[in-house]
Each structure stands twice: as structure tokens, then as C-alpha cells.
Amino acid sequence: MIPSSPSHLEVSFNSPKKKKSSPVDVVLGNDDFVSEILLHLPVKTVLKLKLISKRWLSIISHPSFAIRHTYLNPHTISGLLLNVAYHFKEPSSYLYVSIDGKSVVNVSSDFLRFDPDKPGSTHVSQSCNGLLLCSKRMRYSAERTKPTYYYVFNPTTRQFVELTLPSGVGIRSNRIQLVFDPSKSPYYKVLCILYFKSLLEIHVYSSETKIWKLSMKQENFDSSSVNLNNGVFWNGAIHWISRMGNGFCFLLDKECLQAMPGPPLPESWETNNFRYFGESGGQLHFIGLLTGEQKADIKALGVNASPEMSDDKMTSSSSSDIDSQYIVVYAMEKGCSKWFVKYYLDVNAIVMAYPEITDQDPSVSPCFVSGSIYVSSFIEENGEEGPLLVINMPGEIITYSFKHKAFKKLFSFHPYTHYSCYALKFTETLSLV
């Protein structure tokens, strides 16, 4: 007869009880749940979370995650990439300035040296919803004409792709244009605009197909009235406009040119009145200077204006109403039917806020001052700050908020008079290239 086992031995042979998982463990242990959480986090946070584990790194690095994250998260502008070129000094330098002015970072040359196989300085010509269009000219070449290489670069993820332009581009004048709207498609397009002896060709490259396509060819084209270098992508088309307000656009879906109405400029308008042409917040903007003669017409429109200036301030500026000038922001209606005045800023307000621009001489006319004031960028949507006008004046980059009717200094330059500066909108994105 086999003796029965002691009760304590029976217990020792039983399987140990499994510890009940907490709801947090259940969520974090499921890849789909983790992915959904990460999709709603800012780009900077997501990139840091790559270091949590190999599993999270795999989730975040998957192309489908980048596509979904880009689509779900609005592309807010976090700062400006300033290209500062001092005359007689090469190459130009880059600065990152946050919109609130609290962060100013010198962009090192290594940051833009993403392709080590091709030495030379990198020039950033365009930004479009987080992607940068860059070019690089080789330092040394046996040929008389040094080759230029073009790239699409994501500065957030450090991913880049080199573009091979259509054949025959080298013998004709060409302009390159980046087009990217992540709310419509995860793929970007690049336009190569060729112009040679009145013949206009537009080739379109798609990151989806990886091939170039001749989209349009037109003979007897006159480009003298429009600068083809400064195209702006808005509402499914590339728009070009001259300093006199004459323009046209290229419809990407229909692959054809279309006339574009000009803003309602006064007859006295001259080319040096032009200040800026760009897109922000889903609107197309044309910015220029108007004289005080149009003041009544502007105020009658009831648009957002600059700070109200009291009579004593107007007197201290020693400038008549006729001599005054206004930075006027025109916006295009959605259907591309007409322009309207949306904002304006009295140049006197800039002089009152920054008297050093007149070298402390109150007799200096705002018309003279306005000649040294340029608009580097315009940001339509910017959270609490509201619409922002980015102004480049001697030695300083400032912003003006139409919402708060207030100025803010972003950056001060070294007191060097011979320089130029333009601003590119900087957006963080996980978009693939």
C-alpha cells in the first residue's frame, strides 16, 4: 500500500498562482495601444521615447507610424530658420529662433552636412510643412560649371534623399520647387521649372513613384513680368507673382497654367513697395507698403490694425499723415477670386517702439525709415500670439502680434551694416522623405 503524501508536499507540487496584470501593464504590453498613445504626442516627445525599448523603437520607426502621426498632428510653426548672409563673406550662416524669442540657436555647419560624400556648403532654399529643399555645389570640379546637387531633407529625423533632375536640365535655366501637404497626402512633389528661349516646361517628381514626369510644355512664354524663382504652394497650386502684383499659377491636378488676380494696389504703387509673398494658415498673402493717402480707405475696411497712436505720439514723430506709411497684409479668398486687406501696421508704431531705427533723430520721416524695413515672414496661425508679422530692420528681427497689438524682439545682429536675412518657417514632423 502506497502511503499518502503529506499535505505540505501536495502544495509544493501545485503550479504557482499567476499575478494579475494591472490595466497599465495590459495597455503597455499591447503594440496597438502603445501606437495609439504615441500618435497623439508631440514629435520631440516621440523621438525621445524611442530610447525606452527596442519594441517602442520598432513601433515608432515603422513607416506607417510616421505617416499616421504626420496626418493626425497639426503642423504648427515652432520657430524660424534664419539665413543670414554677410556681404563679402561666405558661406551664409543659419540661426534657429523660436517664435516666442526665448530660444536662439546657431545652426552648426555639421547639422546641414547630412551628405558626407559630397563636400561643400549646403544652402536651404525652401521649407514646406517640415521638409527642407536644399542644394549643394561641389567645391572642386574639373568642369568649368560646378555641379549642383538637390536634396529633400527632414531636419527633425535627419532623413534625406538626393534628387536626380530630368535629363537636359543643365543647358537651360531651371527653378526647383518643393510641394508637400501632409493633410492631403504623405507624399511630396518637386517641380523643376525649365525656361529657355521663351519655351517653358514644368517637370514634376513624385516621392510615391520616384520618377519625373513632363506635366506641361508651353511655347512663346514671357517670364519677364514674373519671378519664377519664388513660387508659393497654396490651395493645390504653385503661385508666382511680380512685385507689381501680376501673377499666375500652375494647377497640379489639371497640369495647366491659370491667371491669378492681382491685389488692389494704388496707381502710385512701385516695385520697391513690395515686401513679401507667401502662405500661412491656409491663406495666401501679399504684403507691401502703402502711403498715408490710402489711410482712410484702409480704416474703412474695418481690418485688424496697428496700435492706436495718440495725438501727442503722432506729433512727436514729426510726420504728417500724408508722409506716413503702412505695412498692409492682403489675403486671397479661398476660390482665388480676389484679394482683400486683412491687416495693416503703421510704420510710426515701429518708430515709437524702436526709436533707435532713426538714430534718435525724431525729424526722420517714416517714409525714409520704411526703406530699411523688410518683412521676413508672416504667420497666420500661432496659438496665443495670434497672427505674427516678422520684421527685419537694421540690426534686429522683431515680431508684431496683430492680436495683442504688441512688438517683441526675436534677435539682435552684430552691428554689421552689410547683411541680408530671410526667414524660413520651421515645423517639426516625422514625415518620410
Image (cartoon, rainbow, N blue to C red):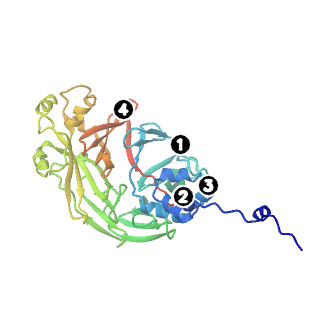
Q: Is residue 401 visible to us here?
A: yes
Is 400 rendered above or below residue 379?
above
What's under tag 2, amino acid-wise?
Answer: Val
Residue 10: horizontal and vertical position, in percent? 78, 65
In the displayed structure image, the side of residue 105 where residue 409 appears, left or right: left
Location of residue 148 in the rendering, given as x and y in whole percent from the top left corner? 51, 54
Name the residue carrying label 4.
417
Asked if disc 4 and disc 1 are in contact, CB closer than 8 Å, the reply is no
Q: First in sequence, mark 3 or 4: give its number.
A: 3
> What residue is pinned by disc 1?
109
Tell whether 99 sits left or right of 60: left
Q: Who is closer to the viewer here, 65 or 56?
A: 56
Which residue is pictured at 38% across the width and 41% down the height? 421
Q: Is residue 147 left or right of residue 335?
A: right
Instruction: Specify the label residue 24 is tagged with.
Output: 2
Indicate which disc, 2 or 4, sits on the residue closer to the N terminus.
2
Mark 3 residue type = Ser
- Label 2 crowd bin: few (<14), some (14–19), many (20+), radius 10 Å: few
- Tag 3 near tag 2, CB within 8 Å: no
Q: Which residue is mark 3?
A: 53
Identity of the amino acid at label 4?
Thr
Q: Position of residue 210 (x, y in %)?
A: 52, 68
Which image quadrant for residue 27?
A: bottom right
Circle 1: residue type: Ser
| Mark toward the start of the polypeptide (3 vs 1) | 3
Q: Of tags 3 and 2, which is closer to the observer?
A: 2
Q: Nearer the viewer, residue 25 or 214?
A: 25
Please identify the residue farthest to the top as the structure is shown.
360
Q: Earlier in the sequence, mark 3 or mark 2?
A: 2
Q: Earlier in the sequence, mark 1 or mark 2?
A: 2
How busy is the neighbourhood of tag 1: few (under 14 within 10 Å), some, or many (20 plus)?
Answer: few
What residue is drawn where x is 42% and y is 53%? 127
